[in-house]
């Protein structure tokens, strides 16, 4: 028990860690953009998000004693759990549903959107959330495509990421 923060519960600690991580992510992007330009920052952000998505799922597999085959039994449930673990209280997740075999992730607010808006570089930013989803599929050994159908950055009222595993 921490004497300075006796009321700090596990869920508070997790929330702080998530907020710190996503805050780091935005600051990293902006520093790269200032140093190397927005095009390079966007390219690097795409690659980093794909790698982070792959790492998230591989860590779940290792901790859960699972392999790719067991992850594919109920991928939507695995991905929902991963989102809860990594994005809870940082993003506003509207829903994550199976629509005809495609997984549709709807996000009402996200730190990338609010951060780019505050910093004034929204016109330069390319959202990389679909790359994170590509990393999820890759780690699960699932072929498919991921793309952004709607985007807060693009002026939509919410984001919509389509994760389309090959059937």
Image: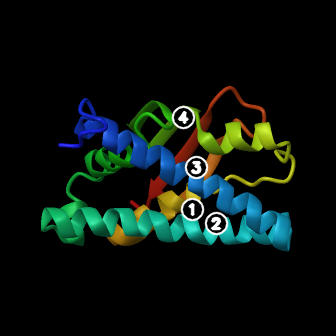
Of helix, strand and loop, which one carries label 4? strand
Question: 43 or 19: nearer the eye?
Answer: 19
Q: Which mark is residue 46?
A: 2
Q: Mark 2 or mark 4, which is nearer the start of the sequence? A: 2
Residue 79 percent location from the top left of the image? 34, 50
* Residue placed under numbered mark 4 in the picture: 107
Q: Nearer the viewer, mark 3 or mark 4?
A: 3
Q: Which residue is mark 1?
A: 131
Q: Are marks 1 and 2 in contact (CB under 8 Å)?
A: yes
Write down the quadrant of residue 107 in the picture: top right
C-alpha separation, residue under disc 4 versus residue under disc 2 = 18 Å
Asked if marks 3 and 1 touch (Cβ < 8 Å), the reply is no
Dot 2: few (<14), some (14–19), or many (≥20) neighbours within 10 Å? Answer: some
Which of pointers 1 and 2 lies earlier in the amino acid sequence? 2
How far is disc 1 from disc 2 in space, using C-alphas? Answer: 6 Å
Cα distance between the residues tagged 3 and 4? 18 Å
Farthest-out residue, front: 3
Q: Closer to the camera: disc 3 or disc 1?
A: 3
Q: Earlier in the sequence, mark 1 or mark 4?
A: 4
């Amino acid at each position: 028990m921490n004497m300075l923060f006796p009321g700090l519960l596990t869920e508070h600690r997790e929330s702080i860690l998530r907020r710190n991580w996503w805050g780091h992510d935005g600051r990293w992007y902006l520093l790269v953009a200032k140093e190397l330009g927005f095009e390079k920052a966007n390219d690097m952000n795409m690659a980093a998000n794909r790698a982070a998505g792959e790492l998230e799922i591989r860590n779940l597999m290792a901790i859960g004693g699972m392999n790719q085959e067991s992850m594919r039994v109920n991928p939507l449930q695995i991905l929902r759990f991963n989102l809860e673990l990594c994005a809870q209280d940082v993003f506003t997740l509207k829903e994550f549903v199976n629509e005809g075999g495609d997984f549709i992730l709807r996000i009402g607010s996200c730190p990338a959107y609010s951060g780019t808006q505050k910093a004034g570089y929204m016109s330069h930013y390319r959202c990389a959330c679909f790359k994170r989803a590509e990393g999820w599929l890759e780690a699960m050994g699932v072929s498919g495509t991921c793309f952004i159908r709607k985007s807060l950055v693009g002026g939509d009222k919410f984001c919509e990421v389509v994760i389309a595993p090959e059937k």
